[in-house]
Amino acid sequence: MLRFTGRAAQLAEIETVLRKSRPEPVIVTGGRGIGRTALLREVTRLVAPTLGATVVVDPRPTPPAPASPPGSPRVVSTAAAIRAAAQESPPPVFILDDAHQAPQQLLLSLRDAHRTFGAGLVISRPDASALPTPDPIDCLLYEPDLRIMELPTLTRTDVGEIVQHWFDAPAPATTVAALHAAAGGLPAVLRELLLGLSRSRRATAAGRPWQLGSDPSEPLPLPDHAREQLLRALRDAWRLLDLELLPDLSLLALRAGARAEAAPVWALVCLLRDETEQGLRLLEGLSADEPAGPGAERILMARALLLTVGAGRVDEAGELLLRAARQWPAAAARMHALRMFLRPLLNTPVDESTEGLTFGSDPQAAVFARAAVAMSELAGARPRRAIPHLRRAIIGAETLRDELPWLVPYLTGALIDALLLAGRLGEATEKAAEFHADRHGSGWDVAVSLSALITRALAVRDREPA
């Protein structure tokens, strides 16, 4: 059971309202999965019983229920039953979940119970975007001193407390941050995530933090709405290159079966962690000889990047991309352009012409082709000629941040280097200060890491015997 956390302020406010001699009606609202039902259940269990009779309104027709245990709230389903209960002394507290689905007559009876007898009302409804038209709750919206309580999402601290309670062990701050993002702060989605993780969790040694694990093949069953929320969080973190969230979010998404979307992200995380072989093992199941499928192109391009930058195997990456170009004609321009971009990163000559790609109709191919020219000029110690190509490539790469968020930071770092090498120190200093000042989300750390990996790959290759 999900621990009831993060709603102390709302419970206290409702209790204060209900203790008044004539309590104002309270409408609890919020989006799907925010915990409206759980809050009303907690009000029924903890708050209302200390104030007198509690009556739960359930308009759904149900078979006669067995006698309720002493102290349990009474359940009514009709307007007549509401009117009868309202006349008791002291007046009861009526609790109705999902009031937007209740018949109009039922809501009018609740309004009259409040107006005439001073009964307490605590009801819930979704946020305005999910309400039907006309909204049956409109009859309550003009009551004097109406309280509309919009539930906030859970905080990271709330998620940390819930995870610690669930697994009987604290979790690392990065894992808590990833779970908070993956759930979107929604208790219902967090519950699905924790249920899925519970099915495969390993025992945690006493006194040790609970760990998410590192096996991307371990299944994490999730319902569709929880999986989609996880993928939204992954896309946001990927676009922002949020290295705090990306490792665990991409791992969760892979375990949830989102291989096509999560594998390239996981691969970049492995590359930046200097775990290239682990990333390649995940990606090697897809070869250029397989038919194109959802995400196959992104996975293959990520594999080529790891082979080049992480393993220094630029010729192998090139062959992989050439095979893909032959197999997937629709993607041929992108495959050739990426190959031309990767080769000069390791000072390997470009053996194809960029003509026809730089100004072609494929924006990704055009960016890689322009960047390939710039990298070739830098490799040939011609920084002045590289600068305009880098500037144009950066402009084009800005439109590709959803797919290739690392490209703009890397090209920006290359532009700063080119400006320095060209003797344009003022421009280089200004650009570097601008880049570094916006370090969070700018990709500065990613650009530095990629440059360091390329430098190491070059050094290793130069030490190898001819």
Image: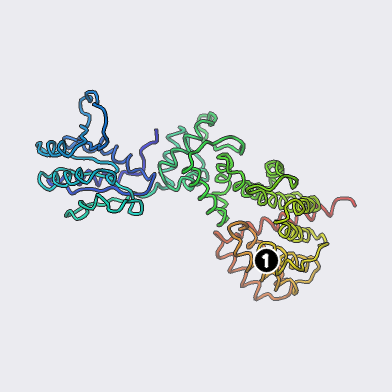
* Mark 1 nearby-residue class (10 Å; few <14, some 14–19, many ≥20): few
**Taking 256 as reference, is 329 left or right?**
right
Q: Quadrant of the N terminus?
A: top left
Query: Within the image, what quadrant is residue 103 found in?
Result: top left
Looking at the rendered structure, the number of numbered marks drawn on it comes to: 1
Element at label 1: loop
466, 151: nearer the viewer: 151
Q: Amino acid at mark 1?
A: Ser
Q: What residue is at 17 percent from the left and 39 percent from the top?
A: 79
Determine whether, in the image, residue 195 is placed left or right of residue 417.
left
Give residue 36's position: percent from left, percent from top.
32, 43
Residue 265 coordinates in the image, percent (x, y): 61, 49
What residue do we see at 64% from left, 67% from top? 394
Q: Residue furthest right?
A: 466
Residue identifier under label 1 = 361
Quarter of the image holding residue 158? top left
**Residue 216 appears at what percent x and percent y?**
61, 39
Question: Dividing the picture into quarters, in which one does residue 189 lie?
Answer: top left
Image location of residue 430, percent across then percent down? 61, 73
The scheme the figure's colours follow is rainbow
Horizontal arrangement in the rendering, residue 292 relative to residue 222 (left or right): right
Q: Foreground residue, 150 or 322?
A: 322
